[in-house]
Image (cartoon, rainbow, N blue to C red):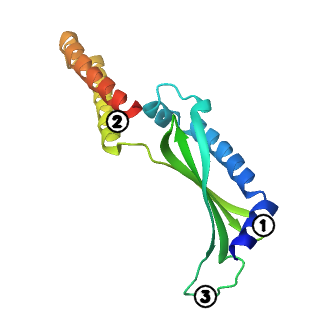
């Protein structure tokens, strides 16, 4: 498929509109299914600050060495990629995969939260904080000691959250 044919194909099958719609459905499902991840990265997620932007729409031929079928319906596909911005910061991308007849056969949402290391630190501190609470409940640690430790951890969590939310 040459560029003109691809451009026509994109218009005929409303790929840009379908990609935007698919993204919104998938992102809303993600927010419902992973609220703990959302709250880890956002103080308050304002959907109006999410700005999707079509990045690329590419035609691809996949060569299956086992089958040597190049003109198969399943070896020809178009991939639409949409970048996701939150407050002008790229936070991931969404892709839709189409057969050449316009049928969407798959999609994927990839979040690229900045600072995975710092996120892991945050998760570890939150887990530690919970363990300390559990020990307090079991009366293995004195309440005044636990309060000091808990407050130190809470300060670290706040510092990390500030870095993540920048």
Q: x, y percentage for residue 1?
A: 70, 77
Say which element carries label 3.
loop
Q: Residue at x 51, y 25 (%)?
A: 44
Q: Nearer the viewer, residue 124 or 102?
A: 102
Q: Which residue is mark 3?
A: 67
Picture quarter containing residue 74? bottom right
Decide: few, some or many residues near mark 3? Use Cα within 10 Å; few <14, some 14-19, many ≥20. few
Q: Nearer the viewer, residue 30 or 50?
A: 50
Q: Which of disc 1 and disc 2 is earlier in sequence?
A: 1
Q: Nearer the viewer, residue 106 or 128?
A: 106
In contact (CB < 8 Å): disc 2 and disc 1: no
Say which element carries label 1.
helix
Q: Which residue is mark 1?
A: 8
Q: Which of disc 2 and disc 3 is earlier in sequence?
A: 3
Q: Which of disc 1 and disc 3 is earlier in sequence?
A: 1
Q: x, y percentage for residue 17?
A: 74, 51
Q: Nearer the viewer, residue 69 or 127?
A: 69
Decide: few, some or many residues near mark 2? Use Cα within 10 Å; few <14, some 14-19, many ≥20. some
Q: Which residue is mark 2?
A: 123
In contact (CB < 8 Å): disc 3 and disc 1: no
Indicate whether 111 appears above or below 61.
Answer: above
């Amino acid at each position: 498929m040459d560029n003109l044919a691809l451009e026509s194909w994109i218009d005929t099958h409303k790929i840009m509109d379908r990609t935007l719609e698919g993204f919104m459905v998938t992102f809303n499902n993600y927010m419902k299914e992973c609220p703990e991840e959302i709250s880890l990265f956002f103080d308050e997620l304002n959907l109006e600050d999410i700005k999707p932007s079509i990045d690329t729409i590419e035609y691809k031929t996949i060569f299956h060495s086992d089958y040597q079928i190049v003109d198969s319906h399943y070896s020809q596909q178009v991939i639409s990629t949409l970048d996701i911005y939150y407050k002008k910061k790229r936070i991931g991308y969404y892709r839709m995969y189409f057969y050449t007849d316009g049928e969407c056969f798959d999609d994927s949402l990839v979040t690229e939260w900045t600072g995975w290391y710092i996120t892991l630190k945050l998760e570890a501190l939150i887990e530690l904080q919970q363990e300390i609470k559990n020990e307090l409940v079991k009366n293995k640690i004195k309440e005044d000691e636990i309060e000091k430790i808990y407050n130190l951890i809470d300060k670290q969590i706040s510092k990390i959250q500030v870095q993540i939310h920048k």
